[in-house]
Image (cartoon, rainbow, N blue to C red):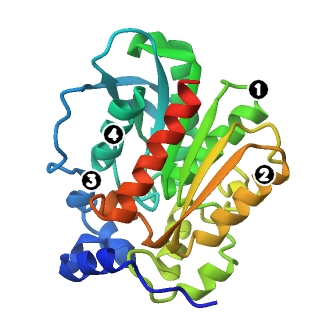
Amino acid sequence: MPFPTVDAEIQSLLDTSDAGLFPFYGLDSVLAVPERYQPLRERPDTPADDRVAVADLFVPGPGGPLRLRVYRPTTDGELPVILYLHGGAFVYGSPEAEEEHALRYAGEAEAVVVSVDYRLAPEHPYPAAADDAYAALTWLAAHAAEVGGDPRRIAVAGGSAGGNLAAATVLRARDLAGPRVVFQLLLYPVLDSGMASASMRESTDVPILNRSATELAWRYYAPGRGSSPYASPLRAADLSGLPPTFLVVAEIDPLRDEGRRYAERLSAAGVTTELIQAPGAVHGFDLLFPKARVSERNLADQVRALRDALHP
């Protein structure tokens, strides 16, 4: 079944954007740039939010000191915590690149957001990023009070490659009897290195992310090791015992069908799961085009899901 038409508002924004803004199609050229394509590493245009204090801290990690960027509402009291994993095809990105998400979650969901500056491929292939994400979760569970957080109310969230790391972190915590996670929010996540879904086969010429770019990302991230469930969470044999899940897929995205399948399997395993498909949306729509109406609606749904889960 072919992809539908791109949302008119997003298409207009795509038509007027600098073609070099979205380098997913050219990951090889991205890797040739030492600063890893600075416009996606930092977003200096992100507006400040006087409701949220921002600070960096460094904690022990499996590859050395691990930077966590902490976004804490200026309200008093112990708050729930959201561990956030940024996207970037496993090869670029940073907490700063997705600061707008972090600020919104902190301010509107009234939670401390802890964003992880994990190691990037290809210099650090799997399991480096997954190990960093899990190390951040274990540190947070033991030291939540140091960031004003409540260790009994920890959620894990992320989009795209960060959605992969979020899902893998939650699986690992269950399998190792690790920290308790009360909720996971997965945005258009990368879930299966097999790339066999219908939406993946059809996505040879779609905006932002296509099949060939996804193949490159997997080649850089998990060469020869993509079958592990902590690399490809959709390959986990058992999804029972995972926390309630909010999962977003974009209608025009090669990752759409693996996200749908993950939601189906979670539900079948008895996990409370809410799946939203954003109509006419492309990969990363809410991050790249936050003012589009489809993005505003979806961001409001994300905040609502986080508030309901973390402030019962």
Of label 4 and label 2, which has the lower sequence position?
A: 4
Q: Nearer the viewer, mark 4 or mark 1?
A: 4
Q: Which residue is mark 1?
A: 177
Residue at the image position 43 percent from the left and 72 percent from the top? 282
User: N-terminal of the two: label 3 or label 2?
Assistant: 3
Spatial separation of the CA atoms under disc 4 and disc 2 = 28 Å
Whether the residues at callouts 3 and 2 have beta carbons within 8 Å, the answer is no
The residue beneath circle 4 is 104
Marked residue nearer the N-terminal end (3 or 1): 3
User: Is residue 165 among what the camera can see?
Assistant: yes
The picture quadrant where one finds residue 56 is: top left
Q: Inspect this view and state whether residue 69 appears.
A: no
Q: Please indicate whether residue 171 sits to the left or right of residue 253 in the image.
A: right
- Horizontal side of residue 159 vs 198, given as left or right: left
Q: Amino acid at mark 4?
A: Arg
Closer to the chain start, of discs 4 and 3, is: 3
Task: Identify the residue at image location x=58%, y=34%.
Answer: 134
Q: Secondary structure at mark 3?
A: helix
Q: Are marks 4 and 1 in contact (CB under 8 Å)?
A: no
Q: Is residue 149 above or below residue 251?
A: above
Report the Cα–Cα distance between label 4 and label 1.
31 Å
Q: Nearer the viewer, mark 3 or mark 2?
A: 2
Q: Amino acid at mark 2?
A: Ser
SS of the residue under disc 1: loop
Give coordinates of residue 270: x percent, y percent.
83, 44
Q: Which quarter of the picture shows residue 201?
A: bottom right
| Spatial CA span between label 3 and label 1 | 34 Å
Earlier in the chain: of badge 1 and badge 2, it is: 1
The residue to which callout 2 is attached is 267
